[in-house]
Image: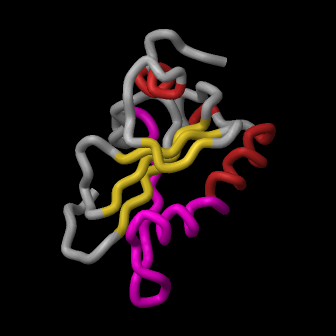
Amino acid sequence: MHDPDCLFCKIIAGQIPSSKVHEDEDMLVFKDIHPAAPVHLLMVPKRHIPSMAQVGAEDAPLLGRMLAKAPQLALDNGCNPYPQGGFRLMVNTGEEGGQEVHHLHIHLLGGPRPWKKG
């Protein structure tokens, strides 16, 4: 499914440029244009899912692959190794949850602290 009005769907389709760091058949990962940390990536499923509120059991394999990919993406993009280093994964859901783009995405944040909270 694709939403022609969705910013992330347009990025996935190549209509809007992004700083891609990973792409496969299920997801696109790119650098956030307003980073809140030295490393700030957005992990976006290629299929349009508006938010975590719409995730169903059928989405578990996709979300599992996305989470399993996060540690390598973190290391490849400048996060220091665990346990002294590390990274944060964050999913905002809905207006009150701080979601700005209504296409499910996982924020991967890391790098030397201090960095903005959020």
- For the C terminus, the image quarter is bottom left
In percent of the image, x 73 and y 37: which residue is there? 56
Left or right placement of residue 115 versus residue 84 in this view: left
Residue 59 is at least partly visible in this image: yes
Residue 38: x and y in percent read: 27, 63
Q: Which residue lies furthest to the bottom in this view?
A: 84
In percent of the image, x 41 and y 22: which residue is there? 7
Q: How is the image coloured?
A: secondary structure
Left or right placement of residue 97 versus residue 74 in this view: left
In the image, residue 69 sits, relative to residue 14, either above or below, namely: below
In percent of the image, x 27 and y 76: which residue is there? 112
Residue 39 lies in the magenta-colored region: no
How many callouts does the rendering have? Answer: 0
Residue 87 lies in the magenta-colored region: yes
- For the N terminus, the image quarter is top right
In the image, residue 75 sits, relative to residue 85, either above or below, namely: above
In the image, residue 107 sits, relative to residue 57, either above or below, namely: below
Residue 92 is at least partly visible in this image: no
Residue 108: x and y in percent read: 44, 57
Q: In terms of depth relative to the viewer, which is nearer, 114 or 18? A: 18
The quadrant holding residue 97 is top left
In percent of the image, x 24 and y 62: which residue is there? 117
Q: Which residue lies furthest to the top in this view?
A: 4
Residue 80: x and y in percent read: 41, 79
Q: In terms of depth relative to the viewer, which is nearer, 68 or 89? A: 68
Residue 32: x and y in percent read: 33, 45
Q: In terms of depth relative to the viewer, which is nearer, 8 or 15? A: 15
In the image, the segment drawn in magenta is 68-94
In the image, residue 58 sits, relative to residue 10, either above or below, namely: below
